[in-house]
Amino acid sequence: MATSPKTAHEGLHSEQGAQRGDHPDRAGNPVIKVEDLAWLEFEKPDLDAAERFAHDFGFATAFRTGNELHLRGTLPGSQCVIIRKGPRSRFVAPAFRASSRADLDRLTRAADGTVRDRRGAGGGAVVDLCDPSGMPVRVVTGVEQLPQLPRQEPLVLNFGQVLRTNVAQRPPLAPARIERLGHVVLETPRFERTVDWYQQNLGLIVSDFLFFPGQRKRGPTMAFIRCDRGATPADHHTLAMHLGPSRQYVHSAYQVADLDAVATGGEYLKKRGYHRAWGIGRHIQGSQIFDYWRDPDSVMVEHFADGDMFDNTVEAGWAQMSASGLAQWGPSVTRDFLGAKPSPHLIRDVVTALRADDNEFDIRRLIGLLRVASA
């Protein structure tokens, strides 16, 4: 017997569910269903500085040459991040993991790509695609799986019952040990077309839609999107996307053991002189305990713990987007996190987006975005 879909009205994660005519939360017959994010790819001019921050943040080095750095967590699997030497710091592409070479072949026929063998560390095969916003997207399979490393064990807590006796709780002030890559957040001026592309080609499912104040009928402006693993739970979001004037990376998130790992890892980063963008708090969509930091190139990265896990029976929730609605508890959201500080780059992107006739970012959307930042 088929399992009936769960809805947001059951109090799972959102105060509203879908209405007639809303954007669907999944494609009916996707080309493939990816299993997870495999890794993220960046370029940076100084790999030594990138590796120093990575170790302070909690990564381990899996592979290093003069031109390439692979960073991993403690859990078995592929590397979390690949950084190649380049003239400036920039995000290059997300890579998703497919279950087989046959999936890559199906993608090439549907999305006009070419399967090629990956050279260098990890091996495997990859197909290079491009989403409607112009973001490169890689889908990989057959990549070498790295063995588990010693992990940071969650602390034993005396909550509700006594589990710890005659032992003091003194977590060390040290880097939090990254366990795995959790998600990446991207901004695009072609939001709904891009969400459709990930649903149709990679089989991703929306866990939550957000919309600008007073603009529910115009459709969503942010989506928290997960992998469809059937009855096996997946992260509430592996990919999150929001409508904005730029096509850009926003942040990426990496799981650590527990709240104390988030907190002590943050204290370690603070003592090392790094900049906290926002935290510590607990999100609403996804429920993660979060802490956001900037690396020396101002790239935003997140430690998180205790995120929601959904199987494929949970339908999307809908909620109004607001700055104050980003967290259940914690300090007020910062302008740094929101990216709301005016800059020549931001002004240029806004003007360009408003002049373009092939995207969804118009003057009403700009007004809605400004309302979100002030709400």
Image: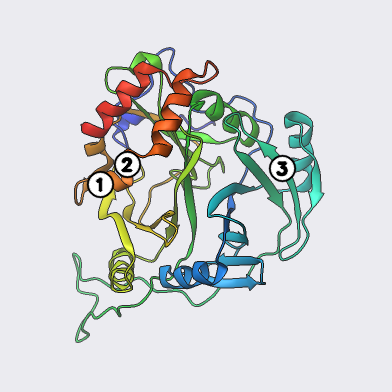
Q: Which mark is residue 334?
A: 1
Q: Nearer the viewer, residue 347 or 263?
A: 347
330 displayed left or right of 244: left
Position in image of residue 192 (x %, y %): 50, 24
Which residue is the site of mark 3?
128
58 displayed left or right of 272: right
Whether residue 355 is visible, yes or no, is yes
Q: Are marks 2 and 1 in contact (CB under 8 Å)?
A: yes
Q: Nearer the viewer, residue 7 or 3?
A: 7
Vertical side of 106 occupied by 47: above or below? below
Q: Secondary structure at mark 3?
A: strand
Q: Nearer the viewer, residue 158 or 44?
A: 44
Position in image of residue 14 (x %, y %): 31, 33
Residue at 25% from the left image edge and 53% from the top image edge: 281
Position in image of residue 236 (x %, y %): 43, 44
Task: Please report whichever mark, 3 or 1, sits nearer to the chain's N-terminal start.
Answer: 3
Choose top left, top right, bottom left or bottom right for residue 201. top right
Q: Which mark is residue 374?
A: none
Q: Which mark is residue 338?
A: 2
166 displayed left or right of 102: left
Task: Please report whichever mark, 3 or 2, sits nearer to the chain's N-terminal start.
Answer: 3
Image quadrant containing the N terminus: top right
- Residues packed near mark 3 inside 10 Å, few (<14), some (14 to 19) or many (20 plus): many
**Tag nearer the camera, 3 or 2:** 2
